[in-house]
Image: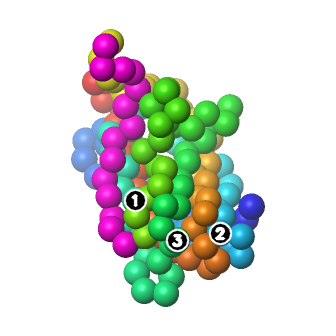
Amino acid sequence: MAGTLTMTASPVAARVTKYAFAWTSDASGDVNGTPFNIGPGTILAVDFIPSGGGTAPTAAYDVTFLNSNSINLFDDGAGTSVGADLSATVPSRRCPLMGTAAVGFFRAWLPGDACSLVVANAGNAKQGAVNVYVTSRPL
């Protein structure tokens, strides 16, 4: 996998950082960029923003956010990812939570790590953006 991926980090509120990823898929429909350092905290929300027109990704494309141990930080711990089967036309905001209805849901703590955004099944030369909002404030 290759494609192109850029990331910018910017503060958006007290103790909240927005990690903005812009991506373009390769001929196989994939993106796998260089790992970026993400500060410690919890993921508050994730925006998935498909490009419009001829560069819109294929319907039901997937985005994962892997730490240095290849653990998908968008996963709920039960195998469901907030980055699975995304719309090619409608932007969405989602929140990765771990747990079950029986024990309750919570946000997992990120110790600060090198993370990689990975896009799959997007189609040839398609584009989109992902915004990951991380707070260092205890929840």
Give the distance between the C-alpha atoms of the residues marked 1 and 3, in whole angstroms: 13 Å
Determine whether label 3 and label 2 are within 8 Å by CB: yes
Is residue 23 in view from this perspective?
yes
Give the distance between the C-alpha atoms of the residues marked 3 and 2, in whole angstroms: 9 Å
Position of residue 73 relative to residue 17, above or below, is: above
* Magenta segment includes 11: no
Position of residue 20 relative to residue 40, above or below, is: below
Residue at 43% x, 70% y: name it: 88
Q: Quadrant of residue 27?
A: bottom right
Q: Residue furthest left?
A: 13
Screen quadrant of the C terminus: top left
Q: Amino acid at mark 3?
A: Thr
Determine whether label 1 and label 2 are within 8 Å by CB: no
Residue position for label 2: 29
Identify the mark nearer the N-term, 1 or 2: 2
Q: Quadrant of residue 114?
A: top right
